[in-house]
Structure formats: C-alpha cells, structure tokens
Amino acid sequence: MAETQKNIVPAHAERPSTSSGRTVGGSGRTVGERTAGRTLMGVVTSDKMQKTVVVMVSHRKKSHAYKKFLTERVKYKAHSENNEFHIGDKVEIVESRPLSKDKRWRVARLVAKAKNA
C-alpha cells in the first residue's frame, strides 16, 4: 500500500508547462495567438462606404415543412482597407474582432472579379 501512495501528487503541486507563455482560459493557446475565425464566400453588393463593403452570403437550406430548398441570404459589413473591391466581385471574408458597431468581418481575398468591370 505504501508503494501506491508514492506516485500520488498533491493537487497544489506545480505542473510542468508545455509553452513558455501564459495560456488563455482552457483553450491551450497562448496570449497573443489569434484563432482562425469562420470564412465565408459572398458577392459585394455595396461599396459606397469608406473602407467598408457589404457582402451578401447565400446558402441553400431544405424546408422540413415543404420539402423544398430555400435560399437564405445574409448581408455582412466587411472591412476593406484600400477600397479595392467593387459591386459584383466575389470575395472571401474572415471573422475578426469588432471594428465598429456593425463590422465584424474583414475581406480576406478576391475570388473573382465582376463580369461587367
């Protein structure tokens, strides 16, 4: 019985750290590390604001009541630093920290240029 008690470590004992920095909550990532947020594809519907574009993201969802597919559309305001994206451009947006009251997304890259441009 004395042998089994040798391997027991008290709860207050210091545990070896795997990283040199502090960790955030129980996530295992260190302070200053950023997580990859969600990414969505959509079409720019408005570029009239400074450093902001409105991106419409649509996805298809099946109606359980009618057994038909419906297209759901959501508009997101995304940050565009150089105002380089215009109406009709297909872009990829990435979730980010809040930039203003409505902006929580950044434009990551241009996927396809508008056909009429």
Image (cartoon, grey):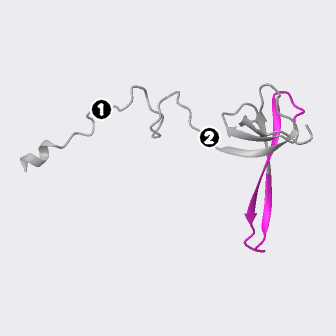
Seen at 80% across and 25% down, the residue is: 82
Give the total of numbered labels. Answer: 2
Q: Is residue 71 magenta?
A: yes
Residues drawn in magenta: 47-73
Seen at 45% across and 40% down, the residue is: 26
Q: Quadrant of residue 66?
A: bottom right
Q: With 28 as the anchor, is 65 left or right in this view? A: right
Seen at 66% across and 33% down, the residue is: 97
Dots 1, 2 in contact, CB < 8 A: no
For residue 60, above or below residue 66:
above
For residue 41, above or below residue 97:
below
Q: Secondary structure at mark 2?
A: loop
Q: Secondary structure at mark 1?
A: loop
The percent position of residue 14, horizontal first and vertical second, equals: 28, 32
Judge by depth and name the residue closer to the eye, 90 or 11: 90
Q: With 74 as the anchor, is 11 left or right in this view? A: left
At label 2, the amino acid type is Gly
The percent position of residue 69, horizontal first and vertical second, equals: 77, 67
At label 1, the amino acid type is Pro
The percent position of residue 107, horizontal first and vertical second, equals: 74, 35
The crowd level at tag 1 (other Cα within 10 Å; few <14, some 14-19, many 20+) is few
* Residue, disc 2: 37
Q: Quadrant of residue 96?
A: top right
Q: With 4 as the anchor, is 18 left or right in this view? A: right
- The residue mark sitting in front, 1 or 2, is 2
> Disc 1 or 2, which lies upstream in sequence?
1
Q: Which mark is residue 16?
A: 1
Q: Is residue 6 magenta?
A: no
